[in-house]
Image: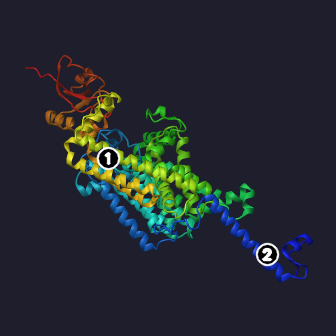
Amino acid sequence: MRCVARSNRTARSTGCTPNDDGNAREVDLARVERLVDLVHLRRQEAADVSPSESPPASPWCDNSPASPRTAWLAAGLVSLLAFVVLLPSLGDRPFYTTGEPREAAVVRAMWDGGSRILPRVDGHRLPSKPPLYHWIALGISEMRGTVDETSSRLPSVLLAALTVGLVVHAGAVTWGAGCGVLAGVILMSTLEWIHQARVARVDATLGFFLTLVLVAVMRARTAPTSTASRAAFSLGVLGATLTKGPAGALLPLTLVAFEGLLGSPSPVERRGLGPRLSRARAFLGANGALLALGLTSVVAGSWTLAAWWIGGNEFAEQLILKENVLRVLDPERLGTGHRHGLFYLVPKLFLGGLPFSLMAPALVVHLVRSRPLAPATRWLVVWTCGVLFLFSLAASKRAAYLLPVYPAAALLLAHLVVMPALDRPTRFLMRQALIGAAAVVALSGGVVLILAFEVPLPAAVPGLLSTKDQQGFAAVLAGVQRQAVLVAGAASGVSLLGMLAIALARNEHFTRATVATAAALALVTAGLIPPLEGAIATERSPRAFARAALRRTGNTDCALLGEADHALGFYIGRPLARPGSLAAAAARGLTCVIAPARVVTKAPPGWAIALQSSSRGESGHDSLVLLQRDTPR
């Protein structure tokens, strides 16, 4: 055997001679050990964490996957907790926006005997979304015996809670049960998630099925692909398609293909695009993309053909052209009002993710300093950035479109929070972020507490608000004072938990600070949001006006002037004619007309104002009047 020393100089420095092979090996091993020690020392110096200062391993996350039984038990318990937190006063808040009653009206049309495939609201309007959400709401309505606010919102609450369970399970089987529980707690405490989980819209349903795809691929990145993960992937793609349309399938398949392109099992494959494309195709196949496409083509395709048979070209124009093409390319032709610039969703993501989005700088620093990323972590980053990027390309944008981002972000944040040792920059950013998040929560509780005790506010405060916001603030103030004891108790608890979280964050107990902040937000969700939302909704909803109008008009057919009011139509419960003017209504023999008060400032000849609403409508300034024909004496 040859000595490793290749020159006289090297031989003299290492003590190796051409005839001393054994000594050369020992010297080389010693050099390797010294290099390893040097690298370890440099890393510690960069992190500014000495071995004696490193905190002990966290029992919350030891990077050891939990057993399936433990993971499912944790997921079930946290899902139940999320459901209980989101449920209070679900039906006490009447409809007053456009989106909720529009979807609830579709469910009522099915309930009243309309087609389960493609119902027509009021006998003429087609739904704007595929039917999966409406089918779930219809099933709940069948069990409850009515279609109302509760039955229309329960699908969102139920599926949002199940999504929390999926996140807990994914975190538990990847990084440990504690890490999964913390991820679920973070998700259920995110502001946008709380909001969308309590409304009768399709977004929470879409978020559940896309999260099913997210966790199925995440599991495949850490363990051999199983039949269960492929089935979950396929079910997620199918459910997303039946909730949102073709975009529901295109989004996850695009992200999975991109993740396959990024993977690099060997240095040789990095040199060409062809091997990467082959690897992406193989990754799609391993996750069950062919099964997902086949199942979606059969089930969703069958519904599409049946709906096309019923609705004809009107269906193709409404659900295919308008909702999936024009909404992306030219929303102005739809009149949706959701056209925004390229970077519109970036601040919306930050605001919707509060208070835990304050940890985003710490997360970014940690991810940059931790490269190369583990496969599961990289997939979560690809999902988060990919969803934001793809929805930013569309011309029509809503903050609710980002709902699928929050489960992935919650997993990333939870893994960061419970890590046993963080470098100095990350620790500093985490400490400031958690202190800021807890301070915002504590301050919010203090403000509500002041309102509950009717402490006079400075006269300048209302002047800082717009007319609409002043009306909303007055409604909130009245609602808080009507339930002063309940609100004051919840606000006190929120403030105390927020202050506790500040103290924990200052001492760098990041896991405990996060749990305390999440507990405060759970109290906000269950104890503060229902009375505040209820006050605003009652002040702006046409429910009371519609019930009073029905008592006055009985079964008489009525007309509606002005723009369509979906909430009014839901509560009236029967089709409203749209004659366009009072003269046209009189010509058609209609004896009662509902119109905005700004359109009818006084009763025209031959008509009398029989009723005027006290509510102001979704915009905060519209009220409604009921006009009835004068009957000759």
Residue 345 position within the rendered picture, expressed as x and y whole percent measured from the top left: 50, 41
Which quadrant does the C terminus fall into? top left
Q: Is residue 385 left or right of residue 80?
A: right
Q: Is residue 72 above or below residue 475?
A: below
Q: Which mark is residue 445?
A: 1
Q: Residue at x 44, y 53 (%)?
A: 207
Name the outermost residue toward the left: 633
Sequence-earlier tag: 1 or 2: 2
Q: Is residue 313 left or right of residue 197?
A: right
Residue 603 position within the rendered picture, expressed as x and y whole percent measured from the top left: 20, 19
The residue under label 2 is 28
Q: Is residue 238 left or right of residue 478?
A: right
C-alpha span from label 1 to label 2: 64 Å
- Asked which secondary structure carries label 1, the reply is helix
- Asked which secondary structure carries label 2, the reply is helix
| Three-letter amino acid code of the residue under disc 1 | Gly
The color scheme shown is: rainbow
**Which residue is at the front of the view, 340 or 237?**
340
Tell me, yes or no, if residue 362 can be seen here.
yes
